[in-house]
Amino acid sequence: MKPHKRQILLRLFVSTLYLSAFTFGGGYVIVTLLKNKFVDQYHWIEEDEMLDLVAIAQSSPGAVAVNGAIVVGYRLAGIAGAAVSVLGAILPPMLFLSVISVFYDAFSSQPSVAALLGGMRAGVGAVIVSAVWDMEKKVAESRDTAQTVILVVSFILSCFCNVNVLWILLGAAAFGLLRALWEKKRKGGRA
């Protein structure tokens, strides 16, 4: 294996291990931090591409954090990158949950633990709002009416109509596919 690829794999593992170890709140939080690490800090992935990878991670079955690690790792270093990223992403929660499960009864009755978890929930909410805000800004900057309509309709369907997110993602993907095919046909018709 080339030294450069070995270095990328090591950095992928350490980054996903670190993010996973110190991130509470689920996959959406770690996906935001993956973006901060690999787009903003390392400049290994462009922001638009990261948003595409996040869309793939969210629409795939399984945990969003693991899916995010898979798509980012695969994009950067192929199958080895995906494997290393997944290992880094799953080790901390596995170890943490193993320890917590052994001592859960002792932990759950402690007022300080309940207060700590309440504070973490508030922080996680803020991080998720920040991630949504960043994604929404990209849609607004594109000045694409169709994307804005998809954003608004998806929000309404999810928040007010209680439509399952899977159906919303599938509908948005189908709309995007039909739109791309229509654009291709329209441009092909002029040529």
Image (tube, grey):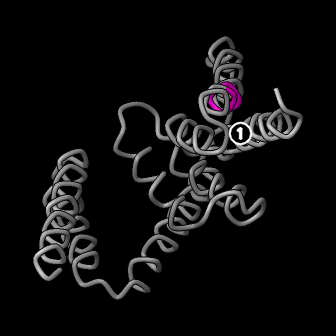
Residue lying at the far right in this picture: please name it: 3
**Residue 12: percent from left, percent from top:** 75, 39
Q: Which quarter of the rendered picture does the C terminus lie within?
A: bottom left
Residue extent of the magenta highlight: 84-88
**Residue 172: percent from left, percent from top:** 21, 59
Residue at coordinates 67% horizontally, 45% vertically from top-left? 23
- Looking at the image, residue 57 sits to the left or right of residue 17; the answer is left
**Residue 97: percent from left, percent from top:** 64, 21
Residue at coordinates 16% horizontally, 63% vertically from top-left? 181
Would you place residue 58 above or below residue 78 in this image? below
- Secondary structure category for the residue under label 1: helix
Q: Residues within 10 Å of mark 1 (few under 14, many from 20)?
A: many
Is 91 magenta? The answer is no
Residue lying at the far front in this picture: please name it: 191
Residue at coordinates 81% horizontally, 26% vertically from top-left? 1
- Looking at the image, residue 141 sits to the left or right of residue 97; the answer is left
**Residue holding disc 1:** 16
Residue at coordinates 51% horizontally, 67% vertically from top-left? 48
Would you place residue 102 above or below residue 89 in this image? above
- Looking at the image, residue 167 sits to the left or right of residue 48; the answer is left
Q: What amino acid type should be assigned to the residue bearing mark 1?
A: Thr
Residue lying at the far top in this picture: please name it: 102
Task: Name the chief secondary structure element in magenta.
Answer: helix
**Residue 189: percent from left, percent from top:** 10, 76
